[in-house]
Image: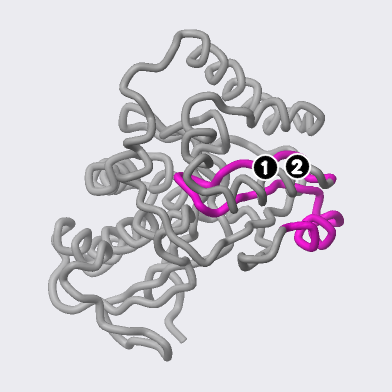
Amino acid sequence: MHVKVPASSANLGPGFDALGMALSLYFECGTSDAPDGATKAEDRHPAMDAFRRAGGAGDLWVRGRIPMGRGLGFSGAARVGGIVAAHAQRGIDDLLGVRKEILHLATELEGHPDNVAASLVGGVTASAGGEVAAVPVAFPASMVVWIPDFTTSTDKSRTAIPPQIPLADVVFNIGRATLLLAALASGDRGVLREATRDRIHQDRRLADAPASAEALRAALDTSALAAWLSGSGPTVAAMCEPADAPAVAAALPAGGTVKVLDIDLEGARLVETV
């Protein structure tokens, strides 16, 4: 058995450092029987660091398709994977029973809970204060992601956000984040575009990534239900009806790889190594 962890899209627009969504793009790791395509994790790899911090011993192999530095939660998924692998090494396979422990350590290592919570639990999650809750999505949806060739640094992009935010902008985001959670749970697709608007981080980050800004505008010019900068970027994510996914994907600009993904509902899990 080995660990399989989904990628994630954080923030979902207004839910800065609190909301996340797991996506069907995966990171895998394990302690024995390395499969084809796997490599030995170096000491500085985030999965190995997390594995050691969680009490793991020996080597760890890794493989995956989550690109680094693109806003799809690579480091968060890797850290969750390493921690789960350490627990599995000790014979603990009931992840629900140790969820809070995994979330606490992964958040400490990552610095914020949004990506790690989604990768751990699956689906759409809200996380704060060491707790995580799953948010039901009452309708089928596909996620079209535009992944450019360039990378961004999460730490660097956070410096673009001022330490003080105007009250009007904070109230704006609280209202949209609340509306977003209600819309997802009730199935009210018609309010999703308004519910994913943001005044805290997106415009500041997009100012340094004009290609991502163009991709976001292109997504919103389609029938997509909503679109946002994924995490700190530069990836742009668009939520759409499954039947509309090909048209949304075709409308996104050149200069990036486009993938049509599902919302992963399982989160981190142990699977048979093949």
* Residue 93: x %, y % from top left: 34, 61
Q: Nearer the viewer, residue 250 or 179?
A: 250
Residue occupying image coordinates x 37% and y 34% = 160
- Report helix, strand or loop for mark 1: strand
* Residue 58: x %, y % from top left: 14, 77
**Residue 169 sits above or below residue 251 on the image:** above
Residue occupying image coordinates x 27% and y 41% = 111
Render colour scheme: one colour
Query: Magenta segment range?
Result: 223-252
Side of 6 relative to 164 (left or right):
right
**Residue 216 sits above or below residue 18 on the image:** below
Q: Is residue 232 magenta?
A: yes
Q: Amino acid at mark 2?
A: Leu
N-terminal of the two: label 1 or label 2? 2
* Residue 153: x %, y % from top left: 35, 52
User: Pointers 1 and 2 in contact (CB under 8 A)?
Assistant: yes
**Residue 133 sits above or below residue 173 on the image:** below
Q: Amino acid at mark 1?
A: Ala
Q: Name the residue carrying label 1.
A: 227
Side of 272 relative to 145 (left or right):
left
- Report helix, strand or loop for mark 2: helix
Side of 115 relative to 34 (left or right):
right
Q: Nearer the viewer, mark 1 or mark 2?
A: 2
Query: Going by the picture, which residue comes out furthest to the top?
Result: 167
* Residue 205: x %, y % from top left: 47, 40
Residue occupying image coordinates x 51% and y 15% = 169
Q: Is residue 200 magenta?
A: no
Residue occupying image coordinates x 26% and y 82% = 40
Q: Return the mark for residue 220.
A: 2
Q: CA distance from mark 1 to mark 2?
A: 6 Å
